[in-house]
Image: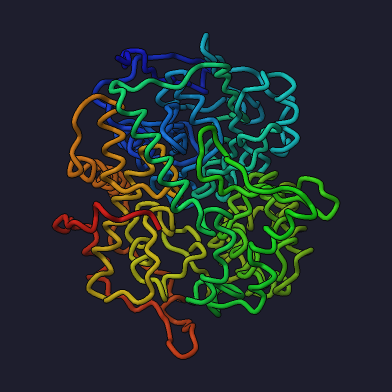
Amino acid sequence: MADRTQDRLIRVDMTRQSVSVESFPDKWKRLGGRGLSARILLEECDPTCDPLEAENIFVLAPGLLAGSSAPTSGRLSVGGKSPLTGGIKEANVGGDAGQDLMKLGYRAVIVTGKPADPDLRFGLVVSADEVTVVAADEHKGKWNYPLIEDLAQVYSGKASFVSIGPAGELLLAGASVACTDHSQERHPARHAGRGGLGAVMGSKGLKFFAIEAGGTPARKPVDKNFFQLSKKYTREFVAGPGQEPFPKWGTSVICEEANSIYTFPYKNRVEGRSPDVDTLDGMRIVESFETRGGGMHNCLTGCIVKCSNIVHDANGEYKTSGLEFETLTMLGSNCAIAHWEDVADLDRLCDDVGLDTIETGAAIGVYMDAGGMEFGDAEGAKRLVREIAEGTEIGRAIGNGAVTVGRLKNHHRVPSVKGQAIPAWDPRPLKAAGVTYCTSAMGADHTAGLVVDPGMAPEEFARTSQESQILNAVVDSSGFCQFLMPNIVEIGEFYSTFLGESITREEMADMGWQCLEDEWEFNRRAGFGPEDDKMAPCMAEDVIGDEVKFVWDVPDDVVASAYERFEVREELFEMRPS
């Protein structure tokens, strides 16, 4: 039987650069990932605090099943009060950091305070023997790729890293948190992108986390049936969904499908289709594997989906990894940049500087739309991203996101909700997704509850959004990747056998709902109200589509109904992440 008394919690006080390790509270036994992050923030963080001051809390919380033999279950939740939205934020990320923290028995890292001297830089080193804060001034200003190359010379070959680039150090609201992937080179290519949590990490003076799990074995379940369940799910996934173009080739290959339903936004969303879809589509990346090398790989230990592409340049040299649909859309089509090769360059730059590609693509799109540069200027866009790292006036504006650029340029078309840019999936044809954008505590975030159904009846918008939000909260709390496509019943079976206690499907759904309630309550205490649950006006003004016209026209009362829990129906338990 597994000894859960060994589960621990790391607390870091960056005002004093001190560390304490505590036993993990039994009251949080069933919580992991997003659910745990939300509870920590609600119980311990002042929702009215300045996101970049000492009172904010920065959280790393692996999913409950991370570090175990469950397939594709090692994802990590990064949490804090968002400098972009002013509300609660959880950004979910792959890479090996979540796996390694949980193998060491660390259920969460909670960082408070900030150094008296903002010019100082530190790292947190986590191993089986100790957790220590180390000086890291020599790494100040480094981009993520050279930073990890340097850290790899200091820490063991099996260490995983969490880091920020210059954008996080400059406290920019579009800054991401990078995690190293499972490649031999440990590329910093997996990013907790949304919400500006890289700036929160930067405000704490932290440049990196180094996690040295070494050969620590996987966490053991209480019930040995867990192993059979893992094998069964793996076998069925690999033989079934794993053979489909998505996820086999990753999200990049769904550009054509998105374009067909008017959710491949073009020129800052004035249109829903791009004339360049063929040269942006991820199948062109797949075709390049034959002559350039690269291919598909698992971004974290134990992943059976293997949807992360490795992209090489024309000389067969590594360029970037994890070039996904959202990036091809927002840094490509949304900016009228026509070719995936240019988007790959931009993706590498964003990963290196430490930026959310969605927010950055939206910000550049607003800048282009406002006359700052020509649509389609790929080289100009690359210069802009480099300027973000340099901290120039326009660089800082782009790095702070679409809303900041809109204010700077006094431009009317700024597609955002709660201060966060709308992702690729457009709320005009996908109205249930739009309800998620309006009601999620995260603002416009497709990972909070995406519904891809352009033909949905209006009476289903709020209910289906709510069900998708519950499911996604459960998935993000478990450590499973959404692309593994587990439903609530299956996740409950993994929980029951791992913890050795019967957990019903209704209890699992309740945990998802409680996560949403915790996030909403944090935002209510932060000052959010119904007036903040508004779609960007341009979405109600700019019509897209040819034969069928799409515009945001969902009434406020329908949006508001997503906050009141609907009667649980069978469809919730059968639903899989979109």
Q: Quadrant of residue 161?
A: top right
Residue 203 seen from this side? no
Which residue is outermost to the right? Answer: 315
Is 13 left or right of 393, judged from the image as shown? left
The residue closer to the viewer here, 169 or 3, is: 3
Is 426 left or right of 449, judged from the image as shown? right
Residue drawn at x 59%, y 47% as measured from the top left: 308
Which residue is outermost to the left? Answer: 567
Which residue is outermost to the top? Answer: 129
| 496 relative to 197, above or below | above
The quarter of the picture where the N terminus appears is top left
The residue closer to the viewer here, 176 or 492, is: 492
Residue drawn at x 73%, y 35% as measured from the top left: 142
Residue 375 seen from this side? yes
What x and y, as percent, mark residue 476?
39, 43
The residue closer to the viewer here, 286 or 169, is: 286
Q: Quadrant of residue 152?
A: top right
| 230 relative to 353, above or below | above
Label count reads 0
Residue drawn at x 40%, y 45% as measured from the top left: 236
Residue drawn at x 24%, y 55% as measured from the top left: 572
The quarter of the picture where the C terminus appears is bottom left
What x and y, as percent, mark residue 328?
62, 62
The residue closer to the viewer here, 545 or 177, is: 545
| 541 relative to 219, above or below | below
